[in-house]
Image: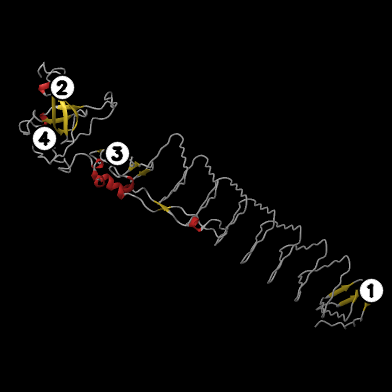
Amino acid sequence: MNAQDNFISKHFAWFTGVVEDIFDPLQMGRVRVRCFGYHTADKAQIPTEDLPWAMVMMPVTSASMSGIGQSATGILQGSWVIGFFRDGPSAQDPIVLGTIPSQTPKGDSEKGFSDPAGKHPINPDEKDIPREARAEYEQSSAYVTRKGLRVTRVEKAVPPKVSSVAVDEPDSYYQRSDWSTLDISQTTKPDYTFNNAIHTQGGHVKEIDDTNESKRMLDQHSSGTYVEVVNSGDRTVYVVGNNYTVVLGSDNIYINGSCNLTVAGDFRHLVKGNYHLEVEGNKTEYIKGSRQSKIGQSEQSEIGKDLATNVTSNLIFRAGANATITIDGSKAQTIGGNCDLTVAGDNGLVVVGKHQEFSAGHHETSSAGHLYLSSKENLEFETLAASAIKADGSQTITIGGTQNMTISGNQTIQASTTNIQNNVNVTGTLTATTQVTAGTPSVSLTTHTHGTPPSTPSPTKPS
């Protein structure tokens, strides 16, 4: 380099050229540029690897020091650039000031002033300005991708009609409805003059659109995942893969309107602390499959009004310890089939008022031990048919007062020994018959008898 050729000299030299190498071994963002008027197109004379490395000028918003600022990458092989040589006519210390968009034709990769890899331009003779910033916006890959990803008619949760609960809502309340993402053909109408678009080599897109009535902000990944805010302030977040959100502190969300959450797959909630749910209106649950609930400790429930439960199949309750049910009002219980009650210990029933039992069929009371009936007032037995009392052992009836027995037909008492003491009033015929297989049969009537005296039957010898 000529000692007189320096930055502050009068020999300050500008250049325009085409980038042929962007793979800086020092990873400083340097590029190799074939400059018009300084280098020939013949690579045999000046190969790409003999071109000097050029530093790339960054904007003042980038510190470009100590790893702070923006990377100096983004220029492609085949990009047109403008710059100057810090060493003047020596042309060995170039600085790139910026890129020059145009309408680049397809070049010859074997010659200079073109992409050596033959990849760019991707669309020869098309304007180098991104389609996102031109009238061809609807042909841009980012727009086509977003339009194809639009989700429509996503079902909302619908409350069920419960047969055991009175319906107090209109029919529309129980009808299925849906929602859809924004139609970008209606919300995206960029004007070339006001849409600031960035389209990277890998297909990532960033737009800041200042078009009147269509102001937008867009960040879109080449996979299709994007975040877009449209003129109305509506925001769309679309993730084509998995989504992860990690909050190391607290997370606070406020929704002034409604919230619709639709999950096409499984939904899991894990809360390692307390879980508080407060609903100032109604809460409905519609579970089409089974529901399981397991509570490690206690559960308390307080209901201000009615509780209605309708089970179309079996109902099973089990308490491992005691069960207490208190009903301050009346209780009505209807059982369409059989009713079985098994008590392993004692069973006590206390009725302060009247106690009634009715059976349309047979009614049996059986005890493996002692059966005790007690009444502090009258005790009445009534049957419209026959009555039979059978005791395999002895029977003792003790009456502290008077016993009145009215029999419209005959009464037959058959016993080996019959003792009737005290007063007996008989209207009609009294017949006593004894049959024994051994010993002497005995019939004794003590005291006096009113009415027709019975004849004493002859003893019958046992056969």
Task: Tell me if residue 13 comes above or below residue 461 in the rendering.
Answer: above
Front one among 236 and 432: 236
Task: Tell me if residue 190 comes above or below residue 435 in the rendering.
Answer: above
How many tags in the picture?
A: 4
Instruction: Looking at the image, tell me whether mark 1 or mark 3 is earlier in sequence order.
Output: 3
The Cα–Cα distance between marks 3 and 4, rounded to whole angstroms, is: 30 Å
Residue plotted at (76% across, 59% down)? 353
Task: Determine contact: label 3, label 4, CB under 8 Å.
Answer: no
Specify the label residue 326 is tagged with.
none
Determine which quarter of the picture holds residue 429: bottom right
Amino acid type of the residue tagged 1 in the rendering: Thr
Task: Determine contact: label 1, label 3, CB under 8 Å.
Answer: no
| Residue that label 3 marks | 207
The Cα–Cα distance between marks 2 and 4, rounded to whole angstroms, is: 22 Å
Mark 4 lies on a secondary structure that is loop
| Residue that label 1 marks | 447
Instruction: Looking at the image, tell me whether mark 3 or mark 4 is earlier in sequence order.
Output: 4
The Cα–Cα distance between marks 1 and 2, rounded to whole angstroms, is: 154 Å
Residue plotted at (50% across, 57% down)? 160
Amino acid type of the residue tagged 3 in the rendering: Glu
From the image, state whether disc 3 or disc 4 is nearer to you: 3
From the image, state whether disc 1 or disc 2 is nearer to you: 2
Specify the label residue 86 is tagged with.
2
Characterize the local packing of mark 2: few (<14), some (14-19) or many (20 or more) Cα atoms within 10 angstroms: many
